[in-house]
Image (cartoon, rainbow, N blue to C red):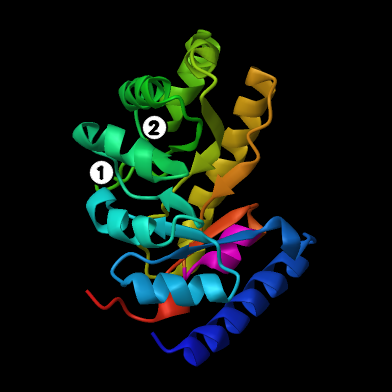
Amino acid sequence: MNAERLAERLATVRRRIADAAESAGRDPAGVDLLAVTKGWGVDAAEAAMALGLTRLGENRVQEAEPKIAALPSAEWHLIGPLQSNKVRRAVNAFTALDALDSFRLLERIQAACTEFAVTRAVLLEVNVAGDPAKHGFAPTELTDALADGSLTARLDRDTSVQVAGLMTVAPLVSDLEDARPAFAGLRVLRDRLEDGLGRALPVLSMGMSADLEIAVAEGATMVRLGTALFGPRAV
């Protein structure tokens, strides 16, 4: 990993975030950057940390484990789908699980956290656009659970799992403006859930390398960036 090139890309990314936030009347400090190191080796993660990027994201448990072992001081986020048979490994390895896409998975994570006596932050992944190729809760699944009280019961069942907010992946579109409804929809859903639950869900993880400006304009508090920082993936 070319550290100088990474530093240049990081400066560009930070300018993009700042410009987008200021255009939307937001404080750029309210947008966290998650550096996605999937497809890159430990050297890329080390270079990112040397530049102050301590929040690192990975898609697969097995790819991440050796990187986490090498850099345990980072704040590691699992941003890809989590298979049931890897829940215990994920809970052991990651600081945060950002793609929780079912209530059954929530229960498994709660059980693992109890077993290992650890606390983990999670995000509920929402398939706002209803894209059959994407994972996540349907928005109505969460609003229905809010209405019947089961969402509150599930979130309160085990305080070792802390639901910090929502995450979404926008659909692939030829015009980036077409991603805006997914980001706006996640923000509206988050606000509705906060009102109904009577608690804050401060994290909106949305926006990637191509569409981060639109996500920031629609309220993203975390953007997940890989290519914009590291270039095309090595694998």
Question: What is the three-letter code of the residue carrying label 1?
Answer: Pro
Q: Residue at x 54, y 66 (%)?
A: 212
Residue 185 visible? The answer is yes
Residue 220 visible? The answer is no
Mark nearer the N terminus (2 vs 1): 1
**Residue for badge 2:** 138
73 left or right of 60? Answer: right
Q: Residue at x 72, y 56 (%)?
A: 30
Number of numbered labels in the structure image: 2
Q: Nearer the viewer, residue 40 or 22?
A: 40
The answer to which quarter of the image holds residue 69 is bottom left
16 left or right of 212? Answer: right
54 left or right of 90? Answer: right
Question: What is the three-letter code of the residue carrying label 2?
Answer: Ala
Can you give x and y, in whole percent of width and height, for residue 28 in the image?
73, 64
Q: Residue at x 30, y 46 (%)?
A: 134
- Tell me the distance, in whole angstroms, between the alpha carbons under discs 2 and 1: 11 Å
Is 87 located above or below residue 174 in the figure?
Answer: above
**Residue for badge 1:** 132
In the rendered structure, which segment of residues is drawn in magenta? 209-216
Instruction: Quarter of the image for the C terminus: give it.
Output: bottom left
Can you give x and y, in whole percent of width and height, for residue 158 in the image?
49, 16
215 within the magenta span: yes
Q: Secondary structure at mark 2?
A: loop
